[in-house]
Image: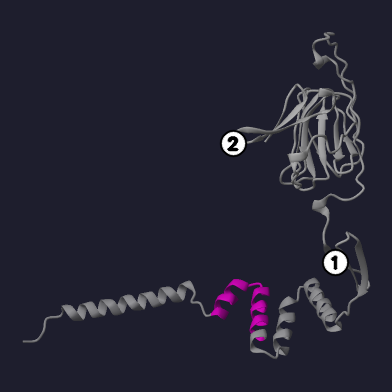
Amino acid sequence: MATGSTGGFVTIWDVKTKKESLTLNTLGRKAVSAVAWDPNKVWDLRNSNAPERTLRGHDGGILSLSWCAQDNDLLLSCGKDNRTICWNPQTGEQTGEFPVVTNWTFETRWNPQNPAFLATASFDGQIAVQAVQDTQALTTSSQSSQAQSIDDEDFFNKAPSQSQGPVFSLNKPPKWLVKPCGASFGFGGKIVSFNTEKEKVSTVRISRFAVDAEVGQATEDFENALKEKSLDDFCKAKAADASLDSDKMDWQLLEKLANKNAREDLVTYLGISTGQDTATDRLADLRMETASYQTLRQPKAP
């Protein structure tokens, strides 16, 4: 477990022994307000005595950090300059900045289930939900100019009047969008496929595939039968041409389903008795039971 202090120290604790493992000193001995672990890398902290990398871009103190669990190349930070910035902590590059709000942004988090979305909470009473792929500038509406009391101790009154649009640029897609391979059919009997090698080099191939003329003709006939509403005749013809009994039964069943009286025809085809037949059989059974009962009650001859 890692904790930060106002004295500028980051302390690593062993939760089993409840003792301090080591202490890291930040540059300038400034207060540490947020700590986040890399979700993928495991660091050997036994010989750590200096930061691995320092990211500079905020104009004020940082209040929150969030490392993307699905892609450790994405790190969010927000703070007292009302900004939310996305970093590549592996290179130290600032990959994007989301709209600047009207007050301090004190908390930012990635969506744990869908990392394409993130949320940022600010002291102006709003929670902004942003998308990583949303790179278009937002249309900002004019805000009402309300008179605010000037108080040097109240930072809520120190806010810009308008927000900016997002400025975001990724040199490569996020890891959850990277697919190892894929394929797609196109017009003209072509198929496009791609795969990614171990060196992260993608190869795209465009090839042709043979189209069966019989399949194409059967598809066209079926579509014409649907348009002309003659599906039952189409099924009859297919049943007559079927060479296997199983195929013939399938087409006959489809023919029954295509008829107007599909329910009655299907019941008859499956050999299920209708309600009238069932009542007649039940009445015959009752008559036989009554006759048997009367026979048993008749007195026997001496």
User: In terms of secondary structure, where does tag 1 sit?
Assistant: strand
Compare marks 2 and 1 and give the one earlier in the sequence.
Answer: 2
Residue depicted at 88% across the width and 80% down the height: 210
Query: In the rendered image, which residue does mark 2 sit on?
Result: 17
Three-letter amino acid code of the residue under disc 2: Thr
Residue 8 image point, x, y percent? 78, 24
Magenta residue span: 248-270
User: In terms of secondary structure, where does tag 2 sit?
Assistant: loop
Is residue 290 shown left or right of residue 212?
left
Residue depicted at 78% across the width and 42% down the height: 117
Residue depicted at 20% across the width and 81% down the height: 295
Is residue 28 shown left or right of residue 291?
right
Residue 293 image point, x, y percent? 22, 77
Main SS, magenta residues: helix
Is residue 279 shown left or right of residue 148?
left
Q: Residue 183 carries which label?
A: 1
Three-letter amino acid code of the residue under disc 1: Ala
For residue 201, above or below residue 256: above
